[in-house]
Amino acid sequence: MKIQTFTVIVGSAACNARCPYCISKMTGIKEMGYKLPEVNWHNFDKACRLSKENHVSTVLLTGKGEPTLFPDQFTEFLEHLKPYNFPLIEVQTNALVFGREFKKYKKYLKKWHELGLNTIAISVAHYQKEKNKEIYAPDSEYIELENVIKDLHEMGFSIRLCCMLIKDYVDTLGEVKNLIEFCKTNEVEQLTIRSIVAPNSSENSDVANWTRTHIPNKKFITEVSNFLKKQGNKLMTLDHGAIVYDLEGQNICLSDCLTIKANTNELRQLIFFPDGHLRYDWQHKGAILI
């Protein structure tokens, strides 16, 4: 068995964003709860050993909610990871706390960097502040994304923007090109674009319905794919099929949100839950190892 990424769930279901396509609300947020859970460190160490034995190079710290809302637990996870010496450690975040409370989080960020955190993967829906506000913070102020990127760069972090492709947001090739220019201007090291997706079975029908009505059409996705094939230089194909390109100096990956790749003994990711369960898919409860 070969495993690509070791994914670690940090914190609870609590979140400071209001994404209408929230994948967590569709896949298991009720089981998680909003109270900070106790971590089964015994099983976490087992999961780390399993990951190392199966040649995992990347650890992704994420959450059913927003992982950075729990900075002390986040630090504790990094401390437990340290002995295993994973070369690449990332966090998936909406980055709102870094824009709103940078002074508070600066000491945490410094510590996290010392403990091996390399990359801050920031979820966005657009390159424009107003559009991101509609998705992430409709009832509050959205962050100055450019300033957040600058601050994190100055602390030594690499940045990946993860832009969800949504109807009426980034849904044309022209908008994708504008997004790429935003990344180049702000020296963003990596850009990943993927369409929003609803799982086959959802725990929240309202979120699933919003998502299905805002999935961009397949013609647009094909157009973007063809553009990257023609104009970009292919760098690599990841195990789950996503392709990474160099486009005039900008790293860009066209990906998806699926986990299981059929007809293979390779897993896209192992997913550790704080209660000690170790899974390899977000939506199928039977995909469990521990």
Image: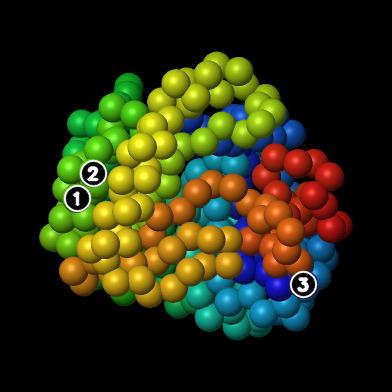
Evaluate if marks 3 and 2 touch, with contact meaning CB atoms under 8 Å apart: no
Instruction: Describe residue 190's horizontal placement relative to residue 256 as left or right.
Output: left
Q: Residue at x 77, y 72 (%)?
A: 1
| Residue under label 3 | 1
Q: Is residue 257 above or below residue 200?
A: below
Q: Which three-letter amino acid code belongs to the residue tagged 2?
A: Leu
Is label 2 in contact with label 1 (beta carbons under 8 Å)? yes
Q: Nearer the viewer, residue 211 or 20?
A: 211
**Can you tell which quarter of the image residue 31 is in?**
top right
In the rendering, at what x and y percent does residue 93 appear?
44, 50
x and y percentages locating residue 38 in the rendered image: 74, 50
Instruction: Calculate the distance from the C-alpha at mark 3 to the C-alpha at mark 2.
Output: 38 Å
**In the drawing, what numbered circle is on residue 173?**
2
Residue that label 1 marks: 177
Number of numbered discs present? Answer: 3
Q: CA distance from mark 2 to mark 1?
A: 6 Å
